[in-house]
Image: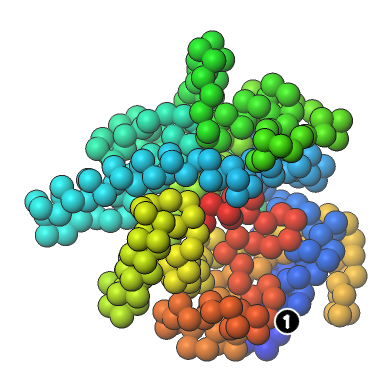
Amino acid sequence: MKYKNHRAIGMYSLYKPNLLIADPDLIRVVLTKEFRSFHDRGMYYNEKTDPLSAHLFCMPGKRWRNMRVRMTPTFTSGKIKQMFPIVKECGEELAKYLQSIAQMRDSVEIKDIFARYSTDVIMSTAFGIKSNCIEEPNNEYRKQEKKIVEMNSIWIALFIFVPKIMDFFSVPFTDRQVTSFYMNMFRENVEYRQIHNIVRHDFMNLLIQLMERGYVDPDDDKKTTDVKSTVSKLTMEEAVAQSYIFFIAGFETSSTTATFALYELAQHHDIQDQVRQDIDEMLTKHGGVTYGAVNEMTYLHKVVNETLRKYPPIPVLNRTCTEEIDLPTMNVRLPKGTLITIPVLGLHRDPSIYPDPDKFDPERFNANVVAERLPYAYLPFGEGPRNCIGKNMN
């Protein structure tokens, strides 16, 4: 509370200068207006030592920009709509499982169930594999997943604060067994599809297109792709890394958000009833669970957005100053290499932006309320050119 009225606060993260920015206008400067000076996250990246680090989240500068251009067409609403039947199938399996255990138990660990469901969805869409984690919670896919999420906090801190030292000693961030598992799994699936001429509407199919020709089919068959304007083809290693971050960024955040949403619905029966009514109306209108039906579940979307406000999956955003710059509207000159921290959780719980911030209130996301709110005060997916590429999957 001591620095509540300050737009920014200077501090040190170990030996590195770090500017914490809590003002939405300054956040806009960093994430969008002056993006060219803050385009890196400062994360560990070494595609030779750690091939799975060569993904969009960690890539620096020009490498990130080139990859983003290639990957953006894979996350259009049209592509996601094509993947929807896969998600629906996994959802039906989840529903059957919940019905069966509801008859045998008084309570269940829903976070674990959602994590298994998220794994099934992402393994199917990203790797084309039916992992069946709902029914087999201790299978090999879950074992590899746990190696990732249960990583030692000290190990993580070393790669955040002294990545150059870890890089100098050629120490990979990703467990070598995890790297081997995902590299082999992806390569074997690509080869199987190519040999048997299998085409499936999933993320892996889009990555195969990027590997074979450098671009993906347009959403509309009548449209054509300007091949001359596309960049180079993806290598096998690059494709694996993108599918890996799709998995990492998806399963934990999705399961956590779903768990918090159910918790809040259990606490607020009036909101729960309204969500159920919204869902029932759209299912009746569309004749079942369809992509269009889910898109029109307006109140459900408000509940999800409010959950992401109160419990953002990533509580802070990080950027690195990539060139010396005078920070606009402040008498501050930032040297190259300065760390930037944006406190997402702090913004989302700021009573001057969200009155009574601890209250779960989906009405905060009514269109008129959102229009009056400060831009860059709601950041569950980041903002600017380097926002979450998969936000449309929400």
- Above or below, 203 relative to 268: above
Residue 117 position by quadrant: top left
Q: SS for tag 1?
A: loop
Whether residue 48 appears in this view of the structure is no
Q: Residue at x 47, y 51 (%)?
A: 291
User: Is 163 situated left or right of 146 in this image?
Assistant: right
Q: Residue at x 60, y 89 (%)?
A: 352
Whether residue 194 appears in this view of the structure is yes
- Above or below, 294 relative to 8: above
User: Is 90 situated left or right of 244 in this image?
Assistant: left
Q: Quadrant of the N terminus?
A: bottom right
- Above or below, 213 relative to 312: above
**Which one is nearer the viewer's eye here, 204 or 245?**
204
What is the total number of numbered labels drawn onto the structure image? 1
Residue 172 position by quadrant: top right
Reading the image, the residue beneath label 1 is 7
Q: What crowding class fits label 1: few (fewer than 14 Cα within 10 Å), some (14-19), or many (20 or more)?
A: some
Q: Residue at x 35, y 61 (%)?
A: 284
Residue 230 position in % (x across, y down)? 81, 33
